[in-house]
Amino acid sequence: MGDVNTAIKDTGSLDLLIFEVEDRVFGINVAKVQEIIEYEPLTPVPKANPNIEGMFMPRNIMITVIDLKRVLGLGEAGNSGDLILTNFNALNMAFHVDKIRGIHRATWQDIMRPSEATDQTEESLTTGIIKVEDQLIIILDFEKIVGDINPDTSLKIHEVDDFEGRKRIDVPILIAEDSLLLNRLIVESLERAGYSNLTHTANGKEAWSLIEKWRDEGTLKENVQCVITDIEMPQMDGHMLTKLIKEDKKTQWIKVIIFSSMINESTRKKGEQLGADGQMTKPEIGRLVGVMDELLLSS
């Protein structure tokens, strides 16, 4: 029981690793970070994407290193700084940064959506902004950075080819996804798979506001029978959205599928404790459709 209470208590909070690139300050969710290693010489990769700085092998695991300075249009990395080793979308990657500042505890409500505070390059790679000690910290979209370098790591749209041409499925689906690109790709993929009654929102807060509205109007079943949610989102994350849905007796029957780059042993356990009906990592769009069919069409 203690583990369940801890999961519920921690829902809505996150730890951000704060780091510097050139004179800019950025953040990444600590849940994506495996470790930090002081920069060491890298092995160049012939004919690689220009943003790939090289490779190295900590503990005999080959890791690709991305030059974050170059990605952000701030020059090229030198032979110093730190390597942030990450794991998301079932991939191990490292990002070369100038300096690690430390860890900051925040809530998803503290995180603002991107605005004019970022330049054009940063805005396209930003998932949120948070103010820490009177300084704006930009939370980067690492999934998009990796997806731009290697499109095979993004949503595997071809996985829905086998579902294409099916009869129209009118079950109402609500999507909560803050990435404009992924939001659009998820909608397009589900439409190709026959799911045509889709409503999409930019974060958990927007999704929950709609659910509350439909609940109070008595029109829930007409508007939402399944929620597909990311975990990392400004204003309200997917775990808090799941918790709110499953704790309300009037909404707990709604199926909730967590579709995130951050599905690992820890987040999967937390999702189960909060009542999620399905969980999978983001590239697996075909598996998402399969789980939706099982939950919504098998009865």
Image (cartoon, grey):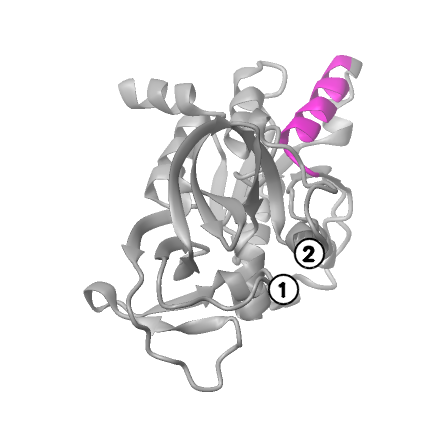
The kind of residue on which mark 2 rests is: Leu
Q: Position of residue 238 (x, y in %)?
A: 55, 33
The kind of residue on which mark 1 rests is: Ile
- Establish if 38 lies above or below 43: above
- Establish if 264 lies above or below 158: above
Query: Within 10 Å of the Cα at label 1, are there few (<14), some (14-19), or many (20+) other Cα atoms?
Result: some
SS type, badge 1: helix
Image quarter of the N terminus: top left
Q: Which residue has dot 2 on it? A: 185
Residue 182 left/right relative to 9? right
Residue at image location 74% in from the left, 47% down from the top: 169
List the single residue furthest toward the front. 23
Prevailing secondary structure of the magenta residues:
helix
Closer-to-camera residue (155/170): 155
List the single residue furthest toward the bottom. 46
Q: Which mark is residue 27?
A: none
> Which of the two discs, 2 and 1, sits closer to the camera?
2
Closer-to-camera residue (290/262): 262
Image quarter of the C terminus: top right
Residue at image location 71% in from the left, 31% down from the top: 224
Q: Which residue has dot 1 on it? A: 157
User: Magenta stretch: residue 204 in it?
Assistant: yes
SS type, badge 2: helix
Task: Kindly indicate whether the residue at mark 1 contacts the one at mark 2 (C-beta within 8 angstroms).
Answer: yes
Chain-order first, disc 2 or disc 1: 1
Q: Position of residue 275 (x, y in %)?
A: 46, 28
Q: Distance between the residues labelled 2 and 1?
A: 8 Å
Closer-to-camera residue (121/205): 121
Q: What span is colored magenta in the figure?
A: 202-216
